Image (cartoon, rainbow, N blue to C red):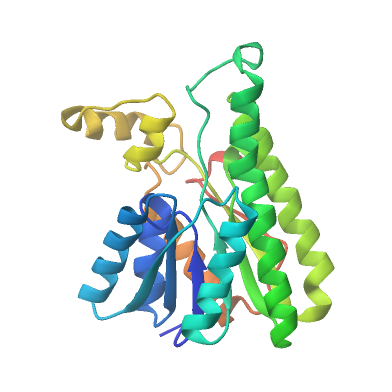
Amino acid sequence: MLLERKSAVITGAGSGVGRASALRFAKEGALVVCTDIRLQWAKETVRQIEAAGGVAIPQECDVASEQDVAATVAAAVERFGRLDIMFNNAGIPAPRRGKTIEDHTIEEFERITSVNLRGVFLGCKYAVAQFKKQGDGGVILNTGSVAGLVGLGDTIYGATKGGVHQLTRGVAIECAPFGIRVNAICPSGMPYTTNFTAAGGTEVPPDALEQYAERVGSIHPLGKPIRAEDCAEAAVYLVSDRAANITGVLLPVDGGYVAR
């Protein structure tokens, strides 16, 4: 029970890394606020947590909205009495994989940056304010990407994740005197997170998914694709007291990809 009675907010908890992390956090004893822009998806995550004996509540949240993010932190405090963990996980891909810089519209640029970067900024802002109010520290975890560590194409998406990485390190140093730790996980190719790949213009028929996953896994030195559960395991460690002296870290969950 690494997170016993810890109050945690997870954005984008309705699917993918967010759902896997919510289930994993709850298994470790956390009290989880599952947020998603699709409330029904968040409710389904809560249903799965409760079926496994955990405690969670759903919360509709568009992370690009300051009002929604502020309300989410307030909901955690109202329901569970405090906030211990803020996992800024929600993000969106580029509208089409491989889209060149000149093909991006300003509307696409603003949408991607508003969710992927402003959303993390807002999550950090309101979590830090609550942690300082409580006076006994706290933990922030952000979802970055290997696309923010190396050039992979998808330039605008990669730029937003590079911004997340720098925000992570900056807030970690700024807030260290207050006992607030801030880290990020940086996943590589996750073919099984089908809602994310589909949103990025990669529709994979169910009967072709394993073949696609094998192809994605082949770019990693360990030879395996990254699963949402891999990210959830890394997330649990970084938000737990086992990582009590770790802050400002960008942890690749990438099968060795950026180490080559």
x, y percent for residue 114: 63, 41
Q: Position of residue 15 (x, y in %)?
A: 35, 51
Residue visible at 65% across and 78% down in the picture: 138
- Closer to the camera in the image, 38 or 258: 38
Residue plotted at (83% across, 78% down): 177
Residue 179 vertical position relative to residue 112 in the rendered view, above or below: below
Query: What x and y, as percent, mark residue 188?
Result: 49, 41
Q: Residue 201: percent from the left, percent from the top?
A: 40, 24
Q: Which is more toward the observer, 48 or 108?
A: 108
Say which quarter of the image contains residue 140. bottom right
- Which image quadrant: the N terminus? bottom left
Can residue 116 be seen at all in this image of the molecule?
A: yes
State the image quarter where residue 129 is shown. bottom right
Q: Which residue is drawn at 74% across and 87% down?
A: 135
Frontmost residue, 27 versus 76: 76
Rendered view: 201 above or below 173: above
Horizontal arrangement in the rendering, residue 213 relative to residue 11 (left or right): left
Left or right? Give the position of 109 relative to 220: right
Residue farthest to the left, as pictured = 207
Outermost residue on the front side: it is 67
Question: Which residue sits furthest top?
Answer: 102
Residue 260 visible? no
Total numbered labels: 0
- The quadrant holding residue 162 is top right
Determine the residue positioned at 66% across, 69% down.
Answer: 127
